[in-house]
Amino acid sequence: CADAQALSQVAPPPGDPRLRALIEDARNQLATARARLGAGKYKEGLATAALVVPVAAQLGYRPLTAEAQALVGELEFKSGNYQAADRAWREALDAAEEARLDELKSRVAVRLANVTVDLHGFAEAHEWLRFAEAMVKRSGGSGEVQVDLWVQIALVYYRESRYHEAEAAARKAIAMAS
């Protein structure tokens, strides 16, 4: 039982105070990049978030890598660079899996479904949506992640001209958001 519990715990921060301070500084940079994302300043946000990726790699702290790559992916996507977004989100997914960050993994899987429609087609997008739905169910994902998932399902169906299924998924998202 103790081993199972240890396997499901999120990767702890390093014990070294100097490393914890570096991680905190990097997270502050990510907060700045998120603020720029929210302000529609994607290029500036990307420049800031991209600085954290090599720092996270050098520190070897996978939760930071997952957070940084997820944000880089979002900023690349908003900038219209779908291939770079796809790469960053796949890196984020790998790091989130290693760090046991199930909520982030769920969010990234939903975002991958979005970008996959344009890069790889509907079949692969549906695979990501199934994966994301399984992750949300397993982790008990937040209401926001569940709503995002069903909005994304609706959008994929809509883009496929499967309007009845799109409407049903959109209604489910609305019910969850209420």
Image (spheres, rainbow, N blue to C red):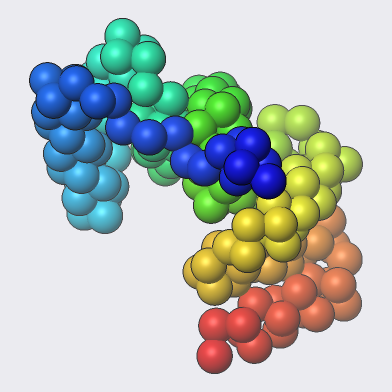
For this view, does 73 lie left or right of residue 32? right
167 over 85 or under it: above or below:
below
For this view, does 81 lie left or right of residue 20? right
Quarter of the picture containing the C terminus is bottom right
Instruction: Name the residue: 76% across, 74% down.
Output: 169
For this view, does 109 lie left or right of residue 69? right
Quick check: can you spot residue 103? yes
Quadrant position of residue 24: top left
Instruction: Name the residue: 69% across, 52% down.
Output: 135
| Residue at the extreme front of the image, as rendered | 2
Quick check: can you spot residue 69? no
66 over 54 or under it: above or below:
below
Q: Pick the residue in front: 74 or 178.
A: 178
Instruction: Name the residue: 65% across, 77% down.
Output: 173
Q: How many marks?
A: 0
Q: Pick the residue in front: 78 or 145.
A: 145
Instruction: Name the residue: 32% across, 19% down.
Output: 56
For this view, does 107 lie left or right of residue 20? right
Q: Position of residue 75 (x, y in %)?
A: 37, 38
Quadrant position of residue 71: top left
Q: Position of residue 175 (x, y in %)?
A: 64, 88
Q: Position of residue 3 (x, y in %)?
A: 64, 36
